Amino acid sequence: MTNATLHALLGESIDYAGLYPPASLDEPSAVSMHGRLLSGGAAWIGARLVWPAGRLPALGALASGHAPIAEPPRTEGAWAISAVTPAIAQWDDFMAALDAVEAFNDRHATPGEPAMRVDCLEVKASNADEIERAIDVLPECFTYWELPVDRDVRGLLIAIADEGFGAKIRTGGTVAAAHPSVEQVAAFIEACTRGRVPFKATAGLHRALRHAVPAIGCTQHGFMNVIVGACMMHAGAIDRHGLERLLADERPTAFTVDAQGVAWDGHRITAAQAAAARAQLMHSFGSCSYDEPLEDLLAMGLVSKEECA
């Protein structure tokens, strides 16, 4: 049932963060869940395993029997890891985390070890000075800088763009105050689009569509809203006002994905435009669940049960 357009729109889009709230799985369960996804019918939607950099030494033993065995120089099937570092303000801890990343990559390129590589870092930065300080010590990994959404980030994005890095937006959390408004998310996506800075989103994106969460007392963003909105803005199909309306849309029938492309409220982009936007702008979203995103795609008729197994 999965079509080429859906693959272009959502392929390799979930960075699995099972260790993080609200799932808060233990380490063995998170590794097992990631291995299950990558070996099943839904492998097409999986991207990286999100893991705290300081806990990388434990990951090697846990992945034995789940990740493939390293056979250099072959790299097919190796798990891609996105390592979350301490904030730059915690400099000593930050530097120790970078050392752990380098040691992890060296070890898991060794024949017989579980084949894994940290190819992305997620780093929290508050200002341009912190970014400039950290740039000189980063290992060879693509870095997403988590930026504050309660202020104008265009200046920070310029610094990131000049170095070829990406940005990260936190779209939710376990309390209402952690959820940025539609306007703040739209401003971030527009700034990344104009600055040509790729980004990832994380937190609060378990469901496909924007929806109310009474237990938290807020409305959470949907991953389909964020991804389709970013792709349509990248393609020039919508402007800032249209993006805000799209991000706020909670209707299950609002989005159509077919062989011709992706449609929303009379606006349409092709599969090729979606693929270009995913490659150049909206890379992925972090989720502590695989089941919830796939359940929603199944309910929307976009995937089959076999593709969720």
Image: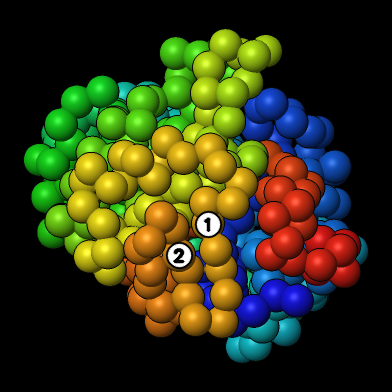
Name the quadrant containing residue 236.
Answer: bottom left
Count of picture labels: 2
Q: Residue at x 61, y 88 (%)?
A: 73
Image coords of residue 210 (percent x, y): 53, 36
Q: Are marks 2 and 1 in contact (CB under 8 Å)?
A: yes
Seen in the picture, residue 282 relative to 147 is either above or below; the reply is below
Q: Which residue is mark 2?
A: 263
SS type, badge 1 = strand
Q: Residue at x 60, y 62 (%)?
A: 47
Image coords of residue 97 (percent x, y): 49, 40
Q: Residue at x 63, y 21 (%)?
A: 213
Query: Relative to residue 127, is residue 147 drawn left or right?
Result: right
Quarter of the image with the C terminus in it: bottom right
Q: Which residue is mark 1?
A: 255
Seen in the picture, residue 269 relative to 150 is either above or below; the reply is below
The span from disc 2 to disc 1 (Cα, nearest Å) is 6 Å
**Counting other residues with Cα less than 10 Å from the Cα at mark 1, is it few (<14), some (14-19), or many (20 or more)?**
many
Quarter of the image with the N terminus in it: bottom right
Return the disc, 2 or 1, that comes first in the chain's sequence. Answer: 1
Query: Relative to residue 4, is residue 264 drawn left or right?
Result: left
Name the quadrant containing residue 251.
Answer: top right
In the rendered structure, which amino acid carries the disc numbered 1? Phe
SS type, badge 2 = strand
Name the quadrant containing residue 131.
Answer: top left
Residue 149 visible? The answer is yes
Residue 173 visible? The answer is no
Query: Relative to residue 5, is residue 295 drawn left or right?
Result: right
